[in-house]
Amino acid sequence: MLEKVMALEFTPFLLSFKLAFITTLILFCISLFLAWSLAQSRSRFKPVFEAITALPIVLPPSVLGFYILYALSFHSPVGRFFQDVLGIKLVFNFTGLVVASCFYSLPFMVQPLQSGFEALPKNMLEASYIAGKSKIETLFLVALPNIKPALMSAIIITFAHTVGEFGVVLMVGGSIPGETKVASVAIYEMVEIMDYTSAHIYSGIMVFISFVVLLCVYIFNRQESHRLGGVV
Amino acid sequence: MIEIEVKKELLGSLGKMDLDVNLTIEAQSFVALSGQSGSGKTTLLRILAGLEEAKGRIVVDDEVWLDGFKALPPQKRGIGFVFQDYALFPNMSILDNLLFVRQDKALAKELLSMSELLELAYRKPATLSGGQKQRVSLCRAMMNRPKLLLMDEPLSALDPFMRNKLQQEILSLHKTFGTTTIMVSHDPSEMYRLSSRVVLLSQGKVVQDGDVKSVLLRTQGSQKFSFEGELLDIIKVDVIYIAIVAIGQQIVEVVLDASEALDLQVGDRVNIGTKAFAPILQKWEKK
């Protein structure tokens, strides 16, 4: 058993975490502004944007994966532009995985942030405007520091969700060892070739890490809500 | 000097109504804005702050804040605003809440010591009492030495003792900084103590505007005193009727004859006044 563990390849895990880290970072930067504008918006079209943002939650990963694969491939103008003009190939490599993951995990970053922003007392933001601060200054100095639990949830859930990705990753990335073969795909293949011991070890590690991550989020949120006296 | 001429359609509790207010306010005066809830007081205040859109014209000391629909954003108005629920920033210390408005440590410390808050300067707002929070909010509003200070029922969430103490502080800040102040209030004693002018709004229009006494005193003609109240009950006792009336926080009994009682219904707003004798004023508790 021990030999089996020692002999296991851990590259898929490293790949999963690298993918999750980069995706979370990119999504945080994009979603911060998206969530802030959605929370502030009084536009008639707000539900349209909200629905589009939430789509990846309800769509089967295969549908999402198919469209992303098509969009990034040489058959679509986007894919052709990247390949011809910028010289970047976007399918069956790590870059493509990052792009696909960003679409797939978008709602998990946007939604907690948006509801965090929306739960802030309106007066608090107005007090900041009256103090002469612009909307962007208010976002970074007042809004963001006061939604720490939501922020924490958004980051951790996005990270965890990207680690747990399977369908989209398989479709867009294939299963190229060291490039696109992430942990979830590796487990699938182990089961397929009936290497149950390896599948058990991999799956066990996934369960353990996921549990610890979620536990940390809940402990942090509990402490934070005590510290702020239930303000947020 | 502040010239206000604003129009806005509001969705009140009684359906649509038009806020239509024309006012000129002297510099350094203290104006109380009163009226029933839903009369448009808070909206007017928010329009003055630039937090709400409206049509019209607002000119403050030759500076145009609103011209038609074109409004100067709240960031550029340099006003102070005190919210009913304090609206402090929970992530910052008391001192940082003040410095957020302007990096002027000397002024921040001066304001905090005026309000006896200097010792709490490094505490977070969550650890303060309601009265202390509102004093911080008041200090914060004064940080950019505003030409115009707007207060939306600043003391209504506080107990009477704290209210009294803060009224003194508001008054001394108003005098020290020479700020033109507009305060939304429901409390006649507060308006009497603080303001020089009371503007009464009803259904979006100014219905009374004058010095405190002319607006707030309820006596008419030769009446010695008069109170507004709500009729709670009418009880028949032999040939007379006794009306139970709530006046503010107090309940009083008034004797009626049958003809008077017939005309009244429980829930009516009534005036209780007397002409025949001089009311006696006795102290029952020292201030």
Image: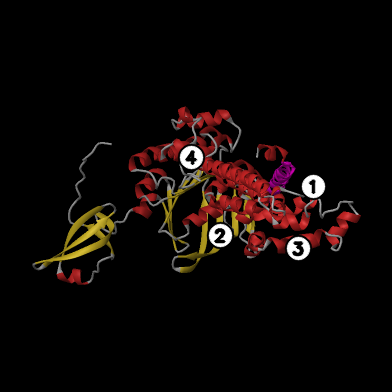
Q: CA distance from mark 3 to mark 4?
A: 58 Å
Discs 4, 2: same chain:
yes
Decide whether residue A25 is among the magenta residues: yes
Q: Which of the 4 image quadrants contains residue A147?
A: top right
The quarter of the picture where the C terminus of chain B appears is: top left
Q: Residue at x 57, y 29 (%)?
A: B105
- Residue B128 visible at all: yes
- Foreground mark, 2 or 1, reads 1
Find residue B141 and report its horizontal and vertical position in percent.
53, 40
Q: Point out residue B148 in the picture as x, y percentages from the top left corner.
A: 54, 45
Q: Amino acid at mark 2?
A: Val
Q: CA distance from mark 4 to mark 1?
A: 60 Å
Residues marked 1 and 3, same chain: yes
Q: Position of residue B211 (x, y in %)?
A: 41, 50
Mark 1–mark 3 CB contact (< 8 Å): no
Q: Which of label 4 and label 1 is nearer to you?
A: 1
Give the chain of mark 4. Answer: B
What segment is highlighted magenta in the picture?
A: A8-30
Which residue, given by chain and number where applicable, does mark 3 sit on? A66
Tell me the residue at 87%/60% (across/down).
A74
Residue B174 visible in the current orientation: no
Q: Which residue is mark 2?
A: B6
Q: Which residue is mark 1?
A: A179
Q: Which disc number belongs to residue B173?
A: none
Give the label on residue B138, or none.
4
Query: SS for tag 4?
Result: helix
